[in-house]
Amino acid sequence: MSNVELAGVSRWYGNVVAVNDVSMSLGAGVTGLLGPNGAGKTTVLHMMAGFLAPSKGTVSLDGEPTWGNPEVYRRLGLVTERESVYDFLSAYEFALASARLHRLPDPEAAARRAIELVELTEAQDRRIGTYSKGMRQRARVAAALVHDPQVLLLDEPFNGMDPRQRLHMMELLHSLGAQGRTILFSSHILEEVEQVSGTVQVIVSGRLAASGDFRTIRRLMTNRPHVFAVQSSDDRRLAVELIGQPSVNGVDVTRDGLTVRAGDYGSFTRALPKIALASGIRVRRLLPSDESLESVFSYLVEA
Amino acid sequence: MTTVSWITARGLLGRRRFLLLFPLPVLLVGLAVLSRAAGVASTEWGLPVVHGLGLGVVLPVTALIVGTAVLGSEIDDGTLLHILTKPLPRWQIVLPKLLVAAGVTALTVALPLYVAGVLVESVRFGLGLAAAGAVGALAYSAFFLALSLLTRRPVLLGLVYVLIWEGLLNNIVSGTRVLSVQHYVVTLTDRIAPTALLDGSVSLPVAIVMSAVFTVGFTLLAIRRLGTFSVAGETS
């Protein structure tokens, strides 16, 4: 079992702080690195993978620094977000080249095993340039897994995959984690993380906003107040009805309709149609106005 | 052949950019053949074709295209990370790439230089040009490969070196020739096959020592830079 440790890690570019005083410890199993775009996930991953020196703090794999230490790649595999692959090679040649660069004792067998693991056997002899986005991604995962690393870092691995490929990749990550490997993948999609990992590290604006069991964090996220914009055939009457609901914390009547602050997303969205029906009010528009992931994350930071 | 050289060679020869290598050598041979066929005395056209075009343009520009492609294009498209995430000492990445760059440049340039040299004067002159050209290919390649790691615009800076430093300043300020690969090649050719056409403007020891300094110095610099190669977060 391998451990990745970040201790008080910050990374800045000139005056811009990309990652701010992040400490985390990753052990066996699958961990999701969740955060909105631009939060610093890629920077954290690149520091873990030894491609970026922390401006402050230390990043280590089993106690050894990852920066400037190519030896860590014996135990570490990386799948970057960028789609770059050697288009002129086939998936098998690509995995084989990786196995040879790792100086594995039987590179051919290792390459075949990795290709099988990502289910690319049928297309393994075709040039990668002819692959779909999802297949290219799997070819890159095969190359990263060819040396059977204890630690696998993946940056947005589900991007561009169709639902079946996504499911397969999720199963693969699950099984790798269950085998005692340390798997970290980044994503800005809550549902992806929910399906793959039990443990999550949430990063917002370069800071570690939450860390730990996914269900607890998810509860924090869903139990927060939600704001809805509502338009109806009779806004004032609807406001009166709504304010009597326990799930509603407040209602503002505006020129464009109602702004409703609900304490519980589920109860409110279930109650609204019933109230409208009972009062004979027609709801023309119901829009969650703060549903962007960024607002969910910023709520987490404030929580 | 190491896996790094194999990937580098396939990447280099498989890209369209490789086709850019051919027009200049063809032009060099074509001009030499035309001049010879037209019966013009080689003293009239030998210097501009061999020195002006062959050593002044074909050799450095070919080395620039190849030298910046073997590492620079992999940095640009991100594929270099596949090699960097391997437990290889960085010299085992830089040296194979340098050897591929120098080898491809030397092969592309040596033949047309040899043909031009034979048409201008003699087989010995052709061989001298080809051999000195190969030395120049190595020194140029080390320089341009290191530039790929030192700057985001290696081609532009390489062109500035070839056109401004070697093409312009060398003719105005003679002291700058000490840092000119082109002049090392001229001196080496003149030594291997003495001719009235070329006049080595730096001494032989300077040409030998500085060729070695260029090659070794920039290779060490490239290894060092690759050891601390950073990848900025693209989406963060």
Image (tube, grey):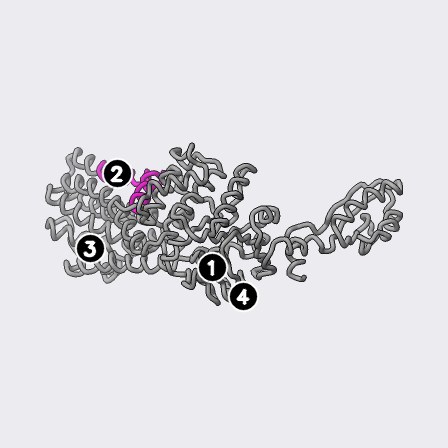
Residue at 42% from the left image edge and 36% from the top image edge = A129
Distance CA(mark 2)–CA(mark 3): 23 Å
User: Which amino acid does the dot numbered 4 rest on?
Assistant: Asp
Residue at 14% from the left image edge and 40% from the top image edge = B118
User: Which amino acid does the dot numbered 2 rest on?
Assistant: Leu
Q: Give the chain letter at badge 3.
A: B
Residue at 77% from the left image edge and 44% from the top image edge = A286
Q: Which residue is mark 3?
A: B184
Q: Position of residue B225 (x, y in %)?
A: 35, 59
Q: Name the image quarter holding the N terminus of chain A.
A: bottom left
* Mark 2 or 3: the one toward you: 3
Per the image, label 3 sits on a secondary structure element best described as helix
Marks 2,1: beta carbons within 8 A: no
Q: Which mark is residue B27?
A: 2
Q: How many marks?
A: 4
Q: Which mark is residue A21?
A: 4
> How many neighbours does mark 3 have within 10 angstroms: few (below 14), some (14-19), or many (20 or more)?
many
Residue closer to the observer: A157 or B205:
A157
